Image (cartoon, grey):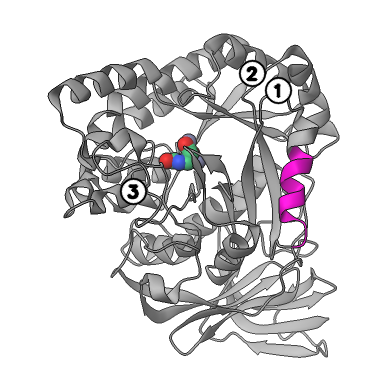
Amino acid sequence: MTILIKNGLIVTSTSSYIADVYVEDGKIKAIGTNLNYSAKTVVDAKGKYVLPGAIDPHTHLAMPFMGTHAQDDYETGTIAAACGGVTSLIDFDIQQKGESIKQALERKKSWAHDKVAIDYSLHPAITDPRPEVIEEIKDAILEYGTPSFKIFMVYDFRVNDATMIKLLEETKKYGGLVQVHAENVHMIDHLNKEFEKAGTMTPYFHAKSRPNIAEEEAVFRASKMVEMTGSKIYIVHLSSKEGLSKVKEAREKGINVFAETCPQYLILDEERYKEQGFNGAKYVMSPPLRTKESNQALWEGINRGDIQILATDHCPFDIKGKKDMNGTDDYKKIPNGAPGIETLLMLMHSEGVVKGKITLEKMVDLLSTATAKMFGLADKGEIVVGKDADIVIFDPEQKFTITQEKLHMNVDYTPYEGIEITGMPVEVYSRGEKVAQWQNDHVEFIGKKGHGRFVKRVALTHF
Ligand code: URP
Ligand code: ZN
Ligand code: ZN
């Protein structure tokens, strides 16, 4: 399969320039002006951007959670990803009690196997830190190709501080990275009891029960463990101005704290919890939506370099049937999570680049180049010779009004319903295979399930 993409604006994390891209056997083989290759497919990309496919390093496909499971599986989730211009994802693989890391990986790979439509990797999430599991960290980094490990400071499957320290020390030895969901569980438990006593249990109180200070304290505690061990850590779904201030403080001292945020924490705010009836449950996720002040602080954190990565935390549950499956009178019983994988790139371009909050090059860095580097996806994340031909032809003028009806995620709502978008992916390639295409008024999947591959990642010794 050969493709010649002509005259597009190639966007890298540092610059943009007009050139042709030649693709052969799924790889970028040449870049230059007036390339003289005869190709099976020629794409006229004049007036379009040629972007590296976005990489979403935070998804929960089919994850069992809060008495149910996240609704997108590897088929529907990766089809939706492709339609949104996401060409790779790294999914969380939550270790079940008694499992080894290898068993957990094999279990999740078997769910993906013949369903997955784009390339993927896995982050083992350590929930049962037996001594032999800690010992297995070395193999996970050096053999299994999964050098990043998620831990939770909240939920029933959280680990304690002693385990965090052990994991930081073990990952440091071999080039691994600990990722942490940082919220103080005791503060949250205390507030849950207070609200229960007061009888204030609507979705709005989900946000009030998980205040900014709970994130701030947990980020601070985690960063002190990093300082003590000389290791590094990655804060997932950073949501608050206060949490960010602790990331900044640590980084200013030279402590290796990295951070990710998500579109929901940049664009939406806690007013959403006041939507009529039970609709506030659509936004019940942890950490919760914050105020506009935090939205603004996070954009600033991105531009200062304190936040390096954008991800979705894609974890969808229907508003009818799932969010309300345990009743509507206790926010604690609402499955936590929201859909987002398909809207990542369009939102970051339209709300970020078009509105002047970030540059186009910064967007590419946050969604592709920095992500590939952070997580060791050696063949992904850039339009350069030798990398996989994971390419999005992006029309910066194409309008689209976000509506669930035109999206592919297996869920009955989008948190972004009605948002007017400027700029959409019009062709999406995964290793040189076209997997999605703009058709009339939306993007349609034209790839094959099973095309995606498990990608072994490299040890993270390069930063
Ligand atoms: O509410 C969320 N974020 N659900 C998914 C699990 C997690 O904490 O990332
Ligand atoms: Zn989390
Ligand atoms: Zn998550």
State the residue in front, 65 or 431: 65
Q: Main secondary structure of the magenta part?
A: helix
The label on residue 324 is 3
Residue 6: x percent and y percent? Answer: 66, 85
Q: For the point 33% across and 23% down, which residue is it? A: 214
Distance from disc 2 to disc 1, alpha carbons, whole Å, reads 5 Å
Q: Residue at x 55, y 80 (%)?
A: 444
**Splitting the image into 4 quarters, where does residue 433 fall?**
bottom right
Residue 116 in the image, given as x and y percentages of width and height: 70, 61
Q: CA distance from mark 1 to mark 3?
A: 40 Å
Relative to 453, is 241 above or below? above
State yes or no: discs 2 and 1 in contact (Cβ < 8 Å): yes
Q: Secondary structure at mark 1?
A: helix
Instruction: State the CA–CA distance, disc 2 to disc 3.
Output: 38 Å
Provide the secondary structure element on which disc 2 rests: helix
- Span of residues in magenta: 105-114
Relative to 49, residue 300 above or below: above
On residue 171, the disc is 1
Q: Tell me where residue 246 sits by quadrant.
A: top left
Of the image marks 1 and 3, the number of the one nearer the N terminus: 1
* Residue 141 at least partly seen: no
Q: Which residue is mark 2?
A: 168
